[in-house]
């Protein structure tokens, strides 16, 4: 097997340690209509298209009950649209704050460029990309393609459509030579559904759900326990490989791409 292209997720994978920006935006958007939602409620569906994710949160029994108690009716499609609009505005205003590359990403970029391995992204929509791409570029991160669910008729993760389109735009015809790197269960499922090689990143991931400061404040034993919990989540999702940090990715690709010795 040879890895010819790598497709990354954004928040929690390549930037935004702990995937904090979407969490803050989801919570504030729902707070604006008087509904409190927990991080756990948000994170269970992270990796979905953001509009679909809003609907998932709206469908939670606790949210439905709170909404009915507050407004005497169940939430409508217009309510979903309004919250999505607020979410987008809040997220867009915070992307610059959360746009720092995660540890190890600079080395990954150098490796991919040196070995002429194409790379791209799936996840953010066009407005988010317009803000985050210049921030990423200033740090040396310049994906060749950036696929949004708007380009796949609204079909996002865990369906394979965005990943398949990214591979197509990179002129990759064999999906098994594409590596999908992400930080949520839906990232792993996207990779699996596309017949790509799926890789889960532990530290700074959405599944871990901790900022870098919060993680570093844990004891070594607590850090090990949290890492083991994330590893188990990725294993249940069917990840092909699980890495503690992005810094381990070049060695993994080198190992996979190593020529197979043949007997003469």
Image: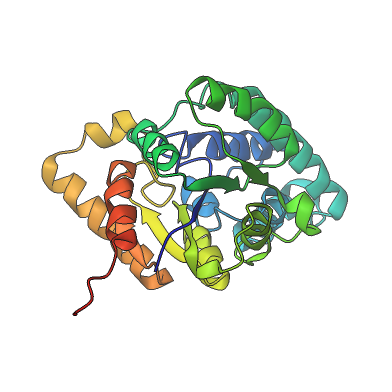
Q: Is residue 51 visible?
A: yes
Image vertical order of residue 104 relative to residue 198, above or below: above
Display colour scheme: rainbow
Residue 169, percent across and down?
68, 53
Q: Locate the C terminus by quadrant.
A: bottom left
Residue 15, percent across and down?
47, 34
Residue 29, percent across and down?
68, 36
Residue at 67% across, 28% down: 92
Residue sticking out furthest to the front: 264
Q: In which quarter of the image is residue 163?
A: bottom right
Residue at 41% across, 39% down: 18
Q: Which one is nearer the viewer's eye here, 118 or 100?
A: 118
Q: Locate the N terminus by quadrant.
A: bottom left
Q: Which one is nearer the viewer's eye here, 184 or 254?
A: 254
Image vertical order of residue 99 relative to residue 22, above or below: above
Q: Can residue 32 be seen in this view?
A: no
């Amino acid at each position: 097997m040879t890895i010819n292209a790598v497709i990354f997720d954004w928040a929690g994978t390549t930037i935004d340690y702990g995937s904090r920006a979407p969490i803050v935006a989801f919570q504030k958007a729902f707070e604006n209509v008087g509904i409190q939602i927990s991080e756990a409620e948000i994170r269970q569906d992270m990796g979905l298209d953001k509009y679909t994710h809003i609907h998932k949160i709206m469908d939670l029994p606790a949210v439905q009950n709170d909404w009915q108690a507050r407004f005497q009716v169940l939430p409508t499609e217009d309510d979903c649209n309004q919250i999505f609009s607020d979410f987008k505005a809040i997220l867009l205003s915070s992307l610059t704050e959360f746009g720092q590359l995660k540890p190890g990403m600079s080395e990954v970029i150098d490796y991919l460029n040196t070995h002429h391995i194409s790379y791209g992204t799936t996840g953010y929509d066009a407005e988010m990309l317009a803000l985050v791409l210049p921030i990423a570029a200033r740090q040396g991160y310049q994906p060749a393609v950036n696929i949004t669910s708007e380009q796949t008729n609204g079909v996002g993760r865990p369906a394979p459509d965005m990943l398949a389109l990214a591979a197509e735009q990179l002129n990759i015809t064999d999906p098994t030579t594409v590596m999908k790197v992400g930080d949520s269960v839906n990232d792993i499922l996207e990779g699996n559904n596309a017949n790509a090689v799926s890789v889960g990143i532990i530290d700074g991931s959405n599944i871990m759900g901790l900022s870098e400061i919060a993680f570093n404040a844990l004891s070594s034993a607590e850090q090990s326990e949290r890492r083991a919990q994330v590893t188990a989540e990725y294993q249940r999702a069917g990840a092909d490989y699980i890495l503690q940090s992005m810094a381990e990715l070049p060695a993994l690709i080198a190992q996979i791409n190593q020529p197979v010795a043949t007997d003469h």
